[in-house]
């Protein structure tokens, strides 16, 4: 440490309780929390309206005539023409697991995790790559759709090295989140993939 820096610190007064070091916390108490009489006189909180199938999601219609109606788990949802089944489910606030989908990237449809059941379709379809059609009936919570996603998750876990404790994505991994939220028992029902060591001779 140079002499000039030591001298500047000695000359400059040190304010221990400066505002830059401490954040003041203000506690605001309501009258109804201080006395029972005030709590009795306080007006009750208004009841919130029931949640609609679209969940208050904002959907921009460039042309109202281009709006189509689809049914997600029995609820009618109006969406603009050209949306995919996955986007229609997002408007209906139905969470569909996915790995490869991103709204700003081209559709790949590689992970097959977003499988849903569509009426008149012989097998589950990838919702990210399937365009929504007028009157389409989408089912996301059926045994067929669940079994299809479970098979995809089993395949991913069987062929994925169990390096979570030392992985850089540990704690921020979509595969971890989806496996624990979708079916926690699948994580422990398979042995980790044993990869041969390539560094030893």
Image (cartoon, helix red, strand yellow):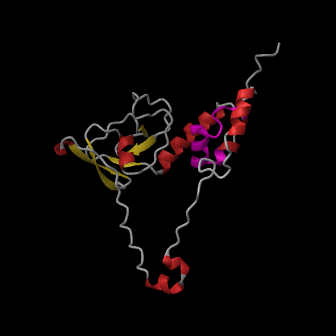
* Residue at 55%, 79% in the rendered image: 34
* Image position of 143 with respect to 46: above or below: above
Instruction: Name the side, left or right, on which 149 lies relative to 73.
Output: right
Percent across and percent down for residue 165 are 72, 36
Q: Which residue sits furthest bottom?
A: 37
Is 152 part of what is drawn in magenta?
A: no
Is 181 part of what is drawn in magenta?
A: yes
What range of the chain is rendered magenta?
166-186
Percent across and percent down for residue 153 are 58, 39
Percent across and percent down for residue 172 are 60, 39
Quadrant for the C terminus, please.
Answer: top right
Instruction: Name the side, left or right, on which 80 lies relative to 55.
Output: left
- Rendering quarter of residue 10: top right
* Image position of 6 with respect to 43: above or below: above
- Is there any visible trace of residue 95 in the rendered image? yes
Instruction: Name the side, left or right, on which 99 lies relative to 7.
Output: left
* Residue in the foreground of this view, choosing between 95 and 150: 95
């Amino acid at each position: 440490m140079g002499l000039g820096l030591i001298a500047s610190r000695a000359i400059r007064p040190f304010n221990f309780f400066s505002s830059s070091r401490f954040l003041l916390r203000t506690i605001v108490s309501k009258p109804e929390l201080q006395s029972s009489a005030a709590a009795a006189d306080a007006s009750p909180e208004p009841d919130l309206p029931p949640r609609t199938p679209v969940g208050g999601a904002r959907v921009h219609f460039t042309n109202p005539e281009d709006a189509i109606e689809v049914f997600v788990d029995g609820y009618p949802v109006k969406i603009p023409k050209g949306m995919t089944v996955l986007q229609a489910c997002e408007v209906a606030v139905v969470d569909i697991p996915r790995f490869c989908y991103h709204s700003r990237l081209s559709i790949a449809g590689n992970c097959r995790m977003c499988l849903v059941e569509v009426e008149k379709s012989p097998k589950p379809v990838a919702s990210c790559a399937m365009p929504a059609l007028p009157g389409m009936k989408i089912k996301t919570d059926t045994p067929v759709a669940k079994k299809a996603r479970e098979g995809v998750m089993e395949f991913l876990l069987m062929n994925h090295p169990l390096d979570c404790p030392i992985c850089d994505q540990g704690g921020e991994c979509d595969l971890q989140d989806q496996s624990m939220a979708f079916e926690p028992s699948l994580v422990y029902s398979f042995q980790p993939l044993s990869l041969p060591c390539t560094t030893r001779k």
